[in-house]
Image (tube, rainbow, N blue to C red):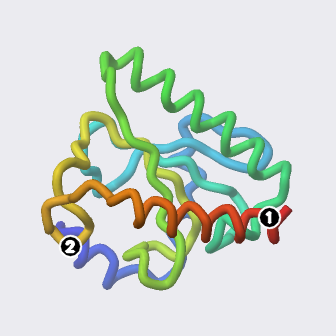
Amino acid sequence: MLYHDYLKKLKACPFCRANKRMLVSNKHAYLTYTKAPYHPHHLLVIPKRHIVSFFNLSAQETEAIDALVKIGAQILKKLKHDSFSILVREGPDSDKSIKHLHYHLIPDIRIGDVDSHGIPRKILSPAEIKKISAKIISLAKKIK
């Protein structure tokens, strides 16, 4: 079955009713395989509470997720993967197909020479770096 066909048939959140898929778990999160992997060893870490945004995680949930991400990373290392990416999609335009926060651990995926639009990436100019850095620093000071 193709992934888009699977998504059309969903009637409820598959991550909220995934008890049989919990390979490793703790009080607030669990680690599992993905049904539509980018790689056969593609893992997911999912909070048990139905939540869409990582901005709404409690400190305990964040700690539980971090612990399972580290366990997942160690598992990938034991499976002989020297490289992997940790991915979280956030926001309405993030192309997140399941509206329940989840962290991907994807081995051997290449994110390389092109940007998100398929255009070859370029090095920022010193002026661009200065402008972006000033904006980030300004925003960070307001968050603290």
Judge whether residue 16 can be spotted in this image: no
Label 2 or label 1, whichever lies nearer to me, is 1
Residue 125, quarter of the rendered image: bottom left
From what the image shows, is residue 20 above or below residue 3?
above
Residue at x 58%, y 28% (from the top left corner): 71
Across and down, in percent, residue 17 comes to 59, 64
Give the image quarter of residue 128. bottom left
Horizontal arrangement in the rendering, residue 76 relative to residue 29 (left or right): left
Residue located at (33% from left, 55% from top): 35
Identify the mark nearer the N-term, 2 or 1: 2
Residue occupied by mark 2: 117
- Quadrant where the N terminus sits is bottom left
Secondary structure under the numbered disc 2 in the rendered image: loop
User: Residue at point 60% right, 35% down?
Assistant: 24
Q: Quadrant of the C terminus?
A: bottom right
Q: Residues within 10 Å of mark 1 (few under 14, many from 20)?
A: few
Say few, some or many: other residues with alpha carbon within 10 Å of mark 2 (under 14 / 14 to 19 / 20 or more).
few
Q: Which secondary structure lies at badge 1?
A: helix
Residue 95, image x, y percentages: 37, 76
Foreground of the two, 40 or 9 = 40
Residue 114 in the image: state x and y as whole percent: 18, 58
Q: On the picture, is 123 further left or further right than 57? A: left
Q: Is residue 133 left or right of residue 110?
A: right
Which residue occupies the foreground of this view, 20 or 134?
A: 134
Asked if residue 67 is positioned above or below residue 21 in the image, the reply reads: above
Residue displayed at 50% across by 62% down: 130
Question: What's under tag 2, amino acid-wise?
Answer: His
Q: Which residue is under mark 1?
A: 141
Instruction: Tell me: 85 left or right of 66.
Output: left
Disc 1 residue type? Lys
